Amino acid sequence: MSKKWLIIIAVVAVLFAMGIAQFLSPRRAVSPTLPSATSTPEQGASAETPLIISTTTVNIIKRPAINPLPIAKGDTVSSWDFVGAYTNNPELMAKANAEIKRITDLLWKGTYTDMSIYVGIANQYELIGDGKNQYDFLIQAVREGGTASGLPWHNLGVLMERLGALETARVAYEKSTLVQPQFKFYHYAYLDFITKKMKDDVVDIEKAFTAANKYFATDADIIQLRAEWEKS
């Protein structure tokens, strides 16, 4: 065999070996840091520094989500802490914290909706009396399913009312009736709140009764609420 052919064969062998090595060598994927067990996905990245995932051709920027229920103008929350059902009971507090860990581990697994899981976590913080964490997880629940379910909105209304942020509570209660207007429970809760805490706000109260009457015009409980308000 000529020297020329030996050189060609050697070059082909080297190129073939390099190709095999490329396929056998491991590839490294780049992924965002997952949140800790008790943080929301937003808390996994800094609110001031967007999370940037870079590849050789694409830059993907994940920006902080907008808060669907900020504290309304004129409202103040002097303290986010309150006396919950488990407050001052170390055994029950430990039980709630263990439940938070258990429920958090269900996130993103598809067994339950993420919205319901976030609501479940928030409920445990309510038992503890930790209003700030309850608020944060209810906000996350709204982001996950607040366009289809009035539940996280209703629970935010209850929390904000408890904390004295009444205008924020009004917004949340009303939103629950707009998302699921066929549920009497949300209408009743909103009407009960607004007729007692904002009984002079005639325009909004009449609007709320009109919305409820589209579905529950002959409901005895709704009728009684109106009668009580008109007498007050």
Image (cartoon, rainbow, N blue to C red):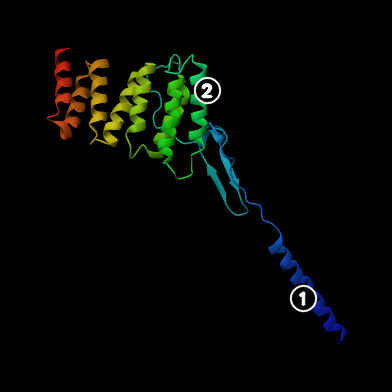
Neighbor class of circle 2 (other Cα within 10 Å; few <14, some 14-19, many 20+) is: few
Q: In this view, does 179 lie to the left or right of 65?
A: left
Q: SS at mark 1?
A: helix
Q: SS at mark 2?
A: helix
Q: Quadrant of residue 162?
A: top left
Q: In which quarter of the image is the N terminus?
A: bottom right
Q: Quadrant of residue 4?
A: bottom right
Q: Are marks 2 and 1 in contact (CB under 8 Å)?
A: no
Q: Earlier in the sequence, mark 2 or mark 1?
A: 1
Q: Nearer the viewer, mark 2 or mark 1?
A: 2
Of 91 and 11, which appears nearest the observer? Answer: 91
Residue 131, given in percent of the width and then of the height, sits at 44, 21
Of 114 and 181, which appears nearest the observer? Answer: 114
Q: Is residue 22 left or right of residue 201?
A: right
Residue 94: assigned label: 2
Q: Label 2 vs label 1: CA separation?
A: 68 Å
* Residue located beneath label 1 in the image: 12
Q: Is residue 116 left or right of residue 12?
A: left
**In the image, farthest residue toward the bottom:** 1
**Does any portion of residue 92 appear in the rendered image?**
yes
Residue 47, given in percent of the width and then of the height, sits at 54, 32
Q: In which quarter of the image is the C terminus?
A: top left
Residue 223, given in percent of the width and then of the height, sits at 14, 24
Q: What residue type is labelled 2?
A: Ala
Neighbor class of circle 1 (other Cα within 10 Å; few <14, some 14-19, many 20+) is: few
Compared to 54, does 22 lie above or below? below
Residue 101, given in percent of the width and then of the height, sits at 52, 32
Residue located 49% across and 30% down the image: 100
Residue located 45% across and 15% down the image: 79
Q: What residue type is labelled 1?
A: Val
**In the image, farthest residue toward the right:** 3
**In the image, farthest residue toward the top:** 232
